[in-house]
Amino acid sequence: MHDPLIKEAEKLEERSKSQIKLKNYDSAISMLNEAKELYSKIGLTEQVGIVIREIVRIKNLKRSDPAASIPSKNLEEKEDLECKEDSEIIVSSEIKGYAMLDQARELAMEEKYDGALKLLEQTYNLFNELEYELESKQILLQINEIKEHIRWKQTGKGLRNKINIKDIVALATAERRRIKLQNQIERPKIPQNEKVSVNSQEMGETIESKYPKIFQQRIKEKEKEQEQMQFQGNIIKEQVNLRKQQIEERRARVKALQEKKKREEELLKEAEDLLTNGKKALINKDYDKATFSYQQAIKIFNQMGWLDQTRTLQKELRNIELYKKEEQRKIEQKILVKKQEEHDFQKRVDSITSEQQRYEEKKLDQHLVIPPLIRNKLEKVNLAKIKAEKEEKMGKFDRVISRFQFILEEFKSIPNDVIDLSREISATEQKLRELKEKK
């Protein structure tokens, strides 16, 4: 994502080198300032520090070059402004480095050594570019101690000993204060070529008479040094307190951001579960449940400020309403079709019933005029049917077949002009085929 910006910054650095060879220092500085802005935009603070050092080097080179033009007042003001901006970037890098050290220290105390080492290596590179020797030295010592502890831990040794987690910022500050105090304290030396009397009183009198002004000057210098030390001590104390306050504020901000992120993750998980339930409800055509799930998800996304997602879900809600109406229309259509089918079926039943009644009436009329001989045959047929049904239930298919053959012969022996038994004959023949298949 940042590759084009990095490439553009690198090109500017290369072009500035050619401008330096041509002694076009202002042009080179301008190009490096553009490269610095690009590196700042993408968060490469280490590279920003390198570019700043190069700009300072070129400015010194320009001042020392007699062939370079004398800058005007406006150019001097511009350079002062650029130096001020450079200082602000260095301060920003310092704050970032201290924050990374705090985070690395917390990770090391939690025995998350991989993360701690990664952060320590990054801060070492950052402070090394800023030429913060004390911090860089303490960071290297801490890195070596952690690596040594890991090595001993992997070999099964040193498990009982906990690693010494240093407060690098405090150590570097204390060391810097010690060096300052050491440089400031210079005790005055008494000239060795002067001969002094053995008697202390005489020695005092001799020195006072010979060097009264020197002693007074030394006393004043000593008092001034003590006042300066006290003043510097107060400044250091204020700086330490300010740094502690800044660290606490930074930790509070980080904690608040972490809690906010955790809450957002919980809300997002809840919204995703609602959407999953809504989609399942849509598949099952439970449109009311789907609508409720989507409405709850919209409330959560509104709370999170995800307006694009909210608009998308509102469109889905409108689609769900359309799906619901379409489903209701289909159900109503099915009900109408079913009612029509039932009506048509009832009409067919009524028609068949009427036809059957007419047939029975016709058959009854024919039965009334049946001769006694034929009536006797029909009675035998009826009796044979009853016996065949009982034997069929008992599984005696041979006897059942014989009886239905007898019935068929009797039906065929009756003339059609006396009684029409064509339906009975067809039914009997069908029954015989079924019985033979069962057999």
Image (cartoon, rainbow, N blue to C red):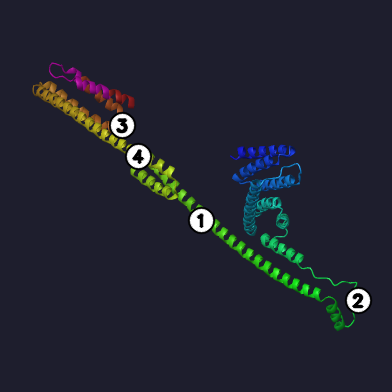
Label 2 sits on a secondary structure element that is: loop
Q: Residues within 10 Å of mark 1 (few under 14, many from 20)?
A: few
Q: Which mark is residue 318?
A: 4
State yes or no: residue 412 in magenta. Answer: yes
For marks 1 and 3 on the same chain, the one whose residue lies earlier in the sequence: 1
For the residues labelled 1 and 3, the Cα–Cα distance comes to 83 Å
Amino acid type indicated by mark 1: Glu
Callout 4 touching callout 1 (CB < 8 Å): no
Do we see residue 162 in this rendering? no
- Decide if residue 358 is in sight here: yes
Q: Image quadrant for the N terminus?
A: top right
Question: Which amino acid type corresponds to the residue marked 3 in the rendered image?
Answer: Gly
Mark 2 or mark 1, which has the lower sequence index? Answer: 2
Range covered by the magenta-colored residues:
410-431
Q: Residue at x 14, y 24 (%)?
A: 359
Residue on which the image places disc 3: 395
What secondary structure is marked by label 3? loop
In the rendered structure, which amino acid carries the disc numbered 2? Lys
SS at mark 1 in the image: helix
Q: Position of residue 255 (x, y in %)?
A: 54, 57
Numbered mark located on residue 376 in the image: none
The first of marks 4 and 3 along the sequence is 4
Element under label 4?
helix
User: Looking at the magenta stretch, what is its main secondary structure?
Assistant: helix
Q: Earlier in the sequence, mark 2 or mark 3?
A: 2
Q: Nearer the viewer, mark 4 or mark 2?
A: 2
**Position of 394 relative to 114 (above/below):** above
Which is more foreground, mark 4 or mark 3? Answer: 4
Q: Quadrant of residue 313?
A: top left
- At 38% from the left and 45% from the top, the residue drawn is 294
Instruction: State the CA–CA distance, disc 4 to disc 3.
Output: 67 Å
C-alpha separation, residue under disc 4 versus residue under disc 1: 35 Å
